[in-house]
Amino acid sequence: MRNDINSLPCMEQPRCLISSCTYDKRLSSDADGKMLSTKNKLSWEEWTLVEDDGGGSTGNIILIKSRSHERFLVCSPEGQLETVDKFNILNHDGNRWRICQSSSDEKAGVAVLMSVEYSKYLIMDNKGDVSCVDKKYLDGRSENWSIEFQNGELCFLSLPERDERISCDVAGKLSMSKNWKGWEVWRFIECGDGHVYISSWTHHKKFLCSNESGDVMTTENRRGPWEKWNVELAPQGGTDGVVIKSTVHNRYLRWNGNALITSKTYEDNAHWTTWHIESAHKQTYFISSSSHDKRIGAKKNGVFTTSNRKGWEQWELKFNRNNGLVTIFSKAHGVYLGSNPEGQLSVGANDGNWGMWKIETSPHGGMFIVSVVHGKALACNADGSLYTIDGQRGSWETWILEPVMPPTMTEEQIKAQRKSLIIGGSIAVASIVLAPFAVMGAVTALGFEAGGIASGSIAAGMMSAEAIASGGGIAAGGTVAVLQSVGAAGLGVAGTAASMGAGAAVGGSAVGIALACSGSKGSTESLSSSKKRMNA
């Protein structure tokens, strides 16, 4: 039920709004590459942060891509800005950016963006025009940008007392469910000062909300004060897990036997107020070769490779709490992946020494999977043959973990099936599996590096709030701790094994990584609640 100490969080690639702190306008662009500024917060204003994997660069360097237009932000030698498509990005030297903590505004989430190639800083003037200028022209205002993340970490939020999870239906109604499906997955989005917003993964417009009377509901009035929550380790002496607290009302999320509410105290209702957090993929992956379109599959008596992504290709990574080593378990056949000294692969009913593996970061954009006993790396050749080999650490030995997400169905899919029912008289079983997404990179962009948290980075700016919340230190598995370990891993794939902390400790991210949460007794907030919150 709990997160193991060692596990890989289920993170989305960071997607954000980039807003001028001085003029409260968003950086935007059109389909032709022209740069704009606007008060809107729509899809044209959303940007994806992509880790720069070219040229062997180090540090917090990223590419910035328009979510709507799939075009990359570039700077000319003269400081002019535009976006270009993926076919032309290599023709522009000014395509790489560094995000650093602002020196003139040290509030959490305030950054400056610098063109790496030309050492010019992104600014907005009083007309809303954007460009890049040399450092000597900065005025301490126009170069400050707010990074507001739109997505985060995906998790289940379970009540161990009932072995049930908080669920959100298409109308936003909250309940407790025995299921482990998409309606039970929640997205935690960092919003600064240690607070988070919590939204349904499937019904992404529905945000968890609480009023001053203790009612819990969902709302589409995203990101107001009633939608802010704190996630903290449960008080000492209580039940192992986390507590979810309304930030503005300082009340604990709990189950009262009939509905989700918030209460003023923890101690009287510890078993109903303590939650456990599990990654949405439940540590289950397709293990794909980075060089060939092949995934590892299992039979009862062996292994093979295939282009399929089905049940026989699903593997659960089981991390050892003490040493970070991992076993690789076929969920379809109940067997473990192993390797003998000659490099031959096999499967077995137990996870003996030959079935112990360690995960290492690969410079080729993935990870190495290395036998602990023999020191040989798992590999796949051009013919799709699997083996382990000593001394080789190239692309054939590099693997990508593709998270296997739970089945879900969105409102749009439900409407489409209702339509097909009316027209055709029958519909398919509602078991839509969303396409797997890559484990998030670009964590180093905010200053989480292999050597620790970079001085002057946004990550460094996160430390003070979390240190206060954890009693003066950074908790294992806390927002900063998890992100630091992800940054240390390079791509955020390996190395996280040592980060997810004791019990159901919290993971999160400066790049907008969140955890799981929440529920409520209502669906959408009432008119009277909406009026009351105008003064909140």
Image (cartoon, rainbow, N blue to C red):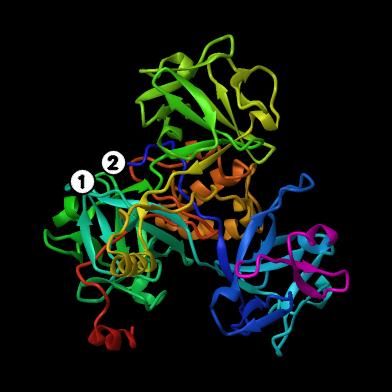
Which residue ends up furthest to the right in the rendered image? 77
Amino acid type, callout 1? Asp
Amino acid type, callout 2? Met
The answer to whether mark 2 and mark 1 are in CB contact below 8 A is yes
Identify the residue under disc 2. Answer: 1
Quarter of the image with the C terminus in it: bottom left
| Closer-to-camera residue (267/80) | 80
Res 72 → quadrant: bottom right
Eyeballing the image, is 327 above or below 534?
A: above
Total labels drawn: 2
Q: Residues within 10 Å of mark 1 (few under 14, many from 20)?
A: few
Residue 152, image x, y percentages? 47, 58
Question: Is 75 included in the stretch rendered in magenta?
Answer: yes
Eyeballing the image, is 256 above or below 404?
A: below
Question: Is 515 included in the stretch rendered in magenta?
Answer: no
Q: Secondary structure at mark 1?
A: loop
Which residue ends up furthest to the top in the rendered image? 342
| Closer-to-camera residue (479/85) | 85
Identify the residue under disc 1. Answer: 163
Q: Residues within 10 Å of mark 2 (few under 14, many from 20)?
A: some
Q: Residue at x 64, y 28 (%)?
A: 397
Highlighted magenta segment, given as a residue range: 67-91
Eyeballing the image, is 456 above or below 392?
A: below
Residue 528 visible to an observer of this rendering: yes
Residue 362, image x, y percentages? 65, 35
Q: Is residue 423 left or right of residue 93?
A: left
